[in-house]
Amino acid sequence: MSVVITVGMADYKTAKMPDILMTAGLGSCIGICVHDPMLKVGGMAHIMLPTANGNKGSNPAKYADTAIELLLSGIMQLGASKMRLRAKMAGGAQMFSFPGKPQVLKIGDRNAEAVEQELKRYGIPLVVADVGGSFGRTIHYDVGTGELKIRTINHGEKVI
Amino acid sequence: MDITQIQLDALREIGNIGSGHAATALSTLLQRRIDMSVPEVWAVPFVQVSDIIGQLDTPQAVVYVKAEGEAPGKAVFFFPLTSAEIVCQALFGTNGPFDLFNDEMAQSALKEVGNILVSSFLIALTQFSGIPFQPSVPALAVDMAGAILDAILIEEGTLDDNVLFIDTQMSGIPQIEGQFIFLPNEGSLNKLLGALGV
């Protein structure tokens, strides 16, 4: 029996096959999903901001850089090999646009860039990403197969 | 930051007066009775945010107005889609369905409702605290409530560990429900409380 494990905002969870990791209502936040396809274990982090800037506060799972570190060590504790890890991500939307305001620093884009850079730093391939746009996403991640199901309100459903 | 009981009471009173004005404005606009709950003040970590706005992936029509000035904050109205549709029907005087995702007239009407509500809230807040606020142009998103809220929370790229809300439920007859929240920005809370002498 597979269990659906919910990952909250600024939260991360790890799981083993056949469990599913889920996070609901990603806007500018990003859901980072990493798994070991051989051992069939993995994890998901729901990050809110790109970098902690040395200020972890009480919740390192909030930031892309500190959350990925936590997520990877959690997955490794389940026995995964860093060499085999594969990543996917979704989110990073721009939900509002204010007329007349420059869009230079879109937080969703900055989040996506930070995740990409951080994964590169650890040498973990980002297999596929579904980021940007102006709509929310709810995601389900199968840690066994690595399938990431993305549901939206008005922009269809897909599996990446 | 830690908030004392007396400060919580002051924030609740801000919520009460501000939301009262906003509910009156909504009632006048829609020409029907609007009830409001006693405002709650919440200081919660993000993981508990869903307890306040309900299911994070339920679609809602959300109007977002920034309160700019010395003590900036964010004002957000959540309307369930059925309620948003009833609000549009009342404003346009029809019974027809509205496609809230695409109908620009309906979206514009909802933004205006948000604008009026938030302006009433801010006028009350200014009268109460002596701090002037200027509402921004309203923005509207019709999508998952959680997705919209996270975008609002992290818009400036910074975030406290806890998020503080002044939260009021409004309901009208028939079948209008809405939730109004006001989020003081980091630093604004002290100014606001200082102006109230607590």
Image: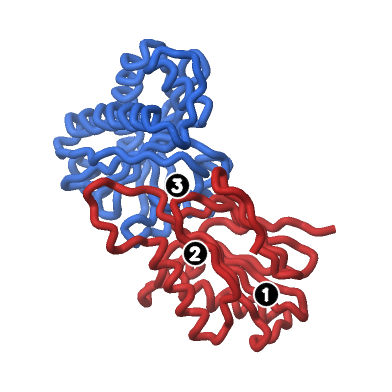
Chain colours: A red, B blue
Tell me where residue A146 appears, x and y as whole percent: 70, 69
> Is residue B123 visible from the viewing direction of this image?
yes
Residue type at numbered disc 1: His
Residue at 40%, 11% in the rendered image:
B32
Residue type at numbered disc 3: Ile
Quadrant of the frame with the C terminus of chain A: bottom right
Label disc, if present, on residue A35 of the rendered structure: 1
When the figure is inspected, residue B71 is found, relative to residue B93, above or below; the finding is: below
Foreground: B186 or A45?
A: A45
> Is residue B6 visible from the viewing direction of this image?
no
Chain letter belonging to callout 1: A
Instruction: Identify the mark nearer the N-term, 2 or 1.
Output: 1
> Looking at the image, is mark 2 or mark 1 nearer the viewer?
1
Kindly state the secondary structure of the residue where label 1 is placed.
strand
Foreground: B182 or B13?
A: B182
Residue type at numbered disc 2: Ile
Residue at 49%, 64% in the rendered image:
A47
Label disc, if present, on residue B148 of the rendered structure: 3
Q: In the rendered view, does B32 fall on the left or right side of A129?
A: left
